[in-house]
Image: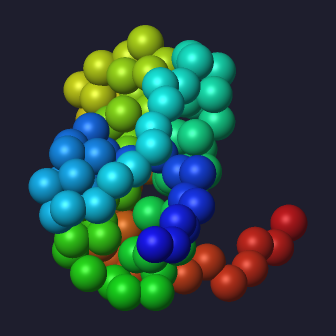
């Protein structure tokens, strides 16, 4: 019987899914500070996975972590959406595909 160490933040139902498959796992609940650090690492992990895969599923995972970061920092995700809309109104989005090559003063 082998043990694989992970030491990473996982979705809430992962321990039950592991145990339902006949395996055992060890978990612990993180402090607020450790949770924020783990979320930052998870955000990078999910971004890396999206960069490698480019799938809609990986984008959904990235969004899930972003929502958890907002909540952990005492914000509602709707605040992020409101800020996104405000910036889009003032500065535009990215649909025009503009690459800024240089600015001359």
What is the residue that sits farthest to the right in this orientation?
105
In this rendering, the answer to whether 75 lies above or below 96 is above
Q: Nearer the viewer, residue 52 or 104?
A: 52
**Residue at image coords 33%, 76%:** 96
**Residue at image coords 46%, 72%:** 1
Residue 55 x/y as whole percent: 26, 81
Image position of 103 (left or right of 25): right
Residue 6 x/y as whole percent: 55, 59
Residue 73 x/y as whole percent: 49, 19
Residue 59 image-quadrant placement:
bottom left
Residue 67 x/y as whole percent: 32, 36
In this rendering, the answer to whether 52 lies above or below 92 is below
Q: Nearer the viewer, residue 62 or 38?
A: 38
Residue 93 image-quadrant placement:
bottom left
**Residue at image coords 47%, 25%:** 29
Q: Nearer the viewer, residue 94 or 3?
A: 3
């Amino acid at each position: 019987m082998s043990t694989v160490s992970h030491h990473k933040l996982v979705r809430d139902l992962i321990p039950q899914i592991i145990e339902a498959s006949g395996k055992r796992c060890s978990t612990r609940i993180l402090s607020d500070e450790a949770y924020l650090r783990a979320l930052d690492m998870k955000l990078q992990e999910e971004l890396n996975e999206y960069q490698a895969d480019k799938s809609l599923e990986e984008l959904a995972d990235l969004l899930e972590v972003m929502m958890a970061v907002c909540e952990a920092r005492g914000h509602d995700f709707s605040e992020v959406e409101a800020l996104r809309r405000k910036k889009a109104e003032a500065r535009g989005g990215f649909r025009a595909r503009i690459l800024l090559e240089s600015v001359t003063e």
